[in-house]
């Protein structure tokens, strides 16, 4: 019998992480001749694995209790943000279908991706409203309630900005401008929420000094909105031409400048997260759904590094993207093994660690 530990919605982080690895493989970091021929096959492999994870979790029913109990958990600052991995998984799979499965070349495929984008981003927006409203109204709020999982809802919104930005360039003219405007709006929502949450999280870590309660995976999650913001800014900036602006080239240049700034801070943050993970040692792996917090942020950083490297025509950045890609594969394999180990322990009734 499948362990009840899978009832945690955070397991959809496995879908987000694996789907993002597929997108990394599809981007072919470094474009090495010996590796490039197998990149499409790797992309398909990881995309199919992500889809299998998603179908399995849906069948398992990790979100089957759509009642007042779920609403209560979403409003809880300690558990609510984890539910954002579900719409996040939908958005990542939509990007995979668009860019890897070739849905971009088919009107029906584009329509499917558009529907998925509306569902995933719509659910993400609803969750952010419910979650943050509850935080505003909560009277007995504790600093330790603020964790890295709070960055997941903003990441979902920013993924929506990337999705609608990509779609605005391939859908029919009747919805192009609407998709472009939506991508701008989503970018604004995601960026501002990320900035505000980052201030809260940084303040919580400095003033309360309880990193062990946050956990090593949660420290890595901040890389998600940082890296996806860099991607979203570039994607949305390309929408300016279809909105009729004559300032399109200047906006694109400025967008890449801002994206590079975010990318630079992401490098600093991965150093901080890496040191904290090293200090945690074996305790860095929690053997829970939280461990997938190592994967998606790293994949997002690879994509941001590779995209910026190609825009700036920087061989150093491409090389860095390759190094991050190798680390990403190792991280994905390690987390997968840890998850399998956790499920086996749960079957035997043993504690997760």
Image (spheres, rainbow, N blue to C red):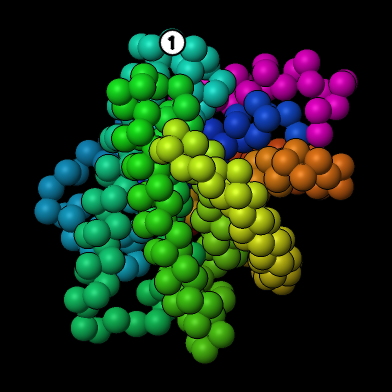
In the picture provided, is 315 more to the left or to the right than 219?
Answer: right
Q: Position of residue 173 (x, y in %)?
A: 36, 22
> Against 143, is 121 above or below?
above
265 lies above or below 307: below
- Secondary structure predominantly adopted by residues drawn in magenta: helix
Image quarter (top left, top right, bottom left or bottom right) of the N terminus: top left
Q: Element at badge 1?
A: loop
Q: Is residue 342 visible?
A: no
Res 33 quadrant in image: top right
Name the residue located 48 percent from the left edge and 32 percent from the top edge.
166
Image coords of residue 306 (percent x, y)? 72, 41
Label 1 crowding class (10 Å Cα cut-off): few <14, some 14-19, many 20+? few
Magenta residues, start to end: 30-51
The one of 264 and 198 positioned closer to us in this rendering: 264
Foreground of the two, 250 or 147:
250
**If the image is split into quadrants, where does the C terminus sit?**
bottom right
Residue 175 in view here: yes
The residue at the point 81 percent across, 28 percent down is 31
Mark 1, residue position: 106
Q: Which residue is rendered at x = 22% and y = 67% of the image?
A: 133
Relative to 188, is 133 above or below?
Answer: below
Q: Residue furthest left?
A: 68
Give residue 7's position: percent from left, percent from top.
33, 45
Residue 131 as seen in the image, left or right of residue 331: left
Outermost residue, bottom direction? 207
Q: Is residue 34 magenta?
A: yes
């Amino acid at each position: 019998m499948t362990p009840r530990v899978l009832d945690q919605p955070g397991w959809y982080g496995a879908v987000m992480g694996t789907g993002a690895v597929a997108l990394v493989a599809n981007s072919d970091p470094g474009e090495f001749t010996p590796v490039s021929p197998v990149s499409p096959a790797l992309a398909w492999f990881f995309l199919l694995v992500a889809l299998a994870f998603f179908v399995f979790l849906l069948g398992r029913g990790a979100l089957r209790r759509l009642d007042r109990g779920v609403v209560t958990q979403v409003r809880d600052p300690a558990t609510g943000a984890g539910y954002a991995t579900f719409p996040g998984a939908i958005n990542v799979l939509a990007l995979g279908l668009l860019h890897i499965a070739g849905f971009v070349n088919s009107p029906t495929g584009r329509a499917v991706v558009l529907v998925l984008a509306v569902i995933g981003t719509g659910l993400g927006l609803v969750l952010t409203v419910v979650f943050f409203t509850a935080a505003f109204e909560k009277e007995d709020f504790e600093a330790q309630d603020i964790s890295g999982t709070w960055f997941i809802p903003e990441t979902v919104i920013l993924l929506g900005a990337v999705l609608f930005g990509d779609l605005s360039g391939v859908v029919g003219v009747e919805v192009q401008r609407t998709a472009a405007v939506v991508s701008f709006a989503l970018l604004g929502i995601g960026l501002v929420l990320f900035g505000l949450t980052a201030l809260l999280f940084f303040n919580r870590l400095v003033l309360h000094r309880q990193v062990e309660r946050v956990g090593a995976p949660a420290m890595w999650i901040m890389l998600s909105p940082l890296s996806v913001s860099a991607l979203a800014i570039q994607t949305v900036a390309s929408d300016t031409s279809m909105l009729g602006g004559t300032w399109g080239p200047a906006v694109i240049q400025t967008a890449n400048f801002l994206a590079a700034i975010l990318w630079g801070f992401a490098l600093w943050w991965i150093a901080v997260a890496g040191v904290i993970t090293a200090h945690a040692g074996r305790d860095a792996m929690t053997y829970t759904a939280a461990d997938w917090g190592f994967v998606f942020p790293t994949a997002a950083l690879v994509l941001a590094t590779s995209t910026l490297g190609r825009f700036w025509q920087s061989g150093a950045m491409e090389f860095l993207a390759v190094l991050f890609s190798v680390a990403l594969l190792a991280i994905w394999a390690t987390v997968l093994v840890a998850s399998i180990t956790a499920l086996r322990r749960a079957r035997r009734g043993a504690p997760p660690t």
